[in-house]
Image (cartoon, rainbow, N blue to C red):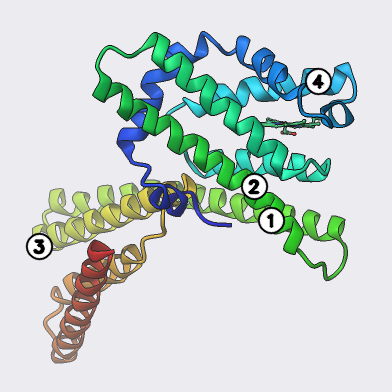
Amino acid sequence: MESIDKIKAHYNFTTGDAANLKQLKPLMEKHKDDFPKEFYNYIKHLEDTPKFLKNEEIIKRHQDGLKQWFVDLFSGEYSTQYLRDIERIGYAHVKINLPAHYVNAAMHFVRQYCLKILEKGFCTDINECRYLAKSVDKIIDINLDVITSSFIEEEIKTYFLSERVESYLIQFANRFAYGLNLILVMGLVIMGVMVMGLFAYDVSHIFAGDIEKGLLGTLGSLLMMWVVIELMDTEVKHLKGGKFATKVFISVALVAVIRKLLVTTLKAEALESQLSVILIAAIAVLGIIYWLIAKIEKTE
Ligand code: HEM
């Protein structure tokens, strides 16, 4: 499956589009109860609909799901979790063997429905209206893309063990990876607290009279704190669906070597000065790698 960032980029879905959809939220929410009714008025003309929507219980569940999906279209938040939700909807339809054509037809209705609301409720300036309509179009196209991809993936799927075992395994692996990521964030929080302790310890050297050791140590622990913040920021962005920043690993190595250099400069022996030269060379190499990665990420 593609990542949410890639899908957004392919549809040229910008933060402006997300803001547009969020702006429409209050207007669209007024129609959240009407939407499932109109949706059903539309799909009842598709001849096989009763085969899939067999009883009141299923219809009620479907209408609740539709309402939530409709509201989420205008949430303004389109992260990995959002992508997972649409994928789940896609698989729910694959599981009941609903022809993909039905979803396409229903999505056509949704597009018309949203645009009609927009025309009636929001349009004073034609250019603004066009911009808003474009954003609505994009999010509907993204939904259609992800949902229909589930159908295509299902068609080309070949199983090594069995469909059920494999889908459980994949689900388990997905959850496990997510759990590990959360443990990583917790670990980083604990690290942050420990670095704060180290910072306080280094500052205490200044008050104890050892100013040089205290100042260099404090500088080192501040650098470490900066790294923990960077790592945490990267991990949180990653959990929200962002790309993983390789640059941050180089910065961790850089800071570790810089800190080592600061500690080494306190000792004036010959062996230590040799070590300092090696450390300075390591900093130069890491610095060049950091600069190269930053440059590549910028051009990307
Ligand atoms: C724009 C198109 C559609 C959207 C957004 C949509 C949305 C949803 C949602 C949110 C669910 C619940 C998924 C879950 O388990 O979490 C669902 C399930 C289902 N959908 Fe749709 N749907 C669409 C089209 C259709 C059509 C055209 C039919 C039938 C003619 C249909 C029949 C069903 C059925 C039978 C279920 C399973 C309900 C259950 O047993 O819980 N859907 N759909």
Does label 3 or label 2 sit earlier along the sequence?
2
Secondary-structure class at tag 2: helix
Q: Name the mark on residue 152.
A: 1
Residue type at mark 2: give it.
Thr
| Label 1, residues with CA under 10 Å away: few <14, some 14-19, many ≥20 | few
Give the Cα distance between marks 4 and 2. 22 Å
Count the marks: how many?
Answer: 4
Horizontal and vertical percent position of residue 48 = 84, 32
Say if mark 3 contacts mark 2, CB within 8 Å: no
Say if mark 1 contacts mark 2, CB within 8 Å: yes
Left or right: 104 as drawn, with respect to 211? right
Secondary-structure class at tag 3: helix
Nearer to the camera, 164 or 40: 40
| Label 3, residues with CA under 10 Å away: few <14, some 14-19, many ≥20 | few
Secondary-structure class at tag 1: helix
Give the Cα distance between marks 4 and 1. 26 Å
Q: Name the residue under label 4.
A: 59
Relative to 243, is 200 above or below?
Answer: above
| Residue sitting at x 19%, y 77% | 288
Q: Name the residue under label 3.
A: 212
Does label 3 or label 1 sit earlier along the sequence?
1
Front label number (3 vs 2): 2
Give the Cα distance between marks 1 and 2. 7 Å
- Quadrant of the displayed image that contains ligand 1: top right
Residue type at mark 1: give it.
Ile
Give the Cα distance between marks 3 and 1. 66 Å
Horizontal and vertical percent position of residue 9 = 39, 51
Give the Cα distance between marks 3 and 2. 65 Å
Front label number (3 vs 4): 4
Nearer to the camera, 159 or 126: 126
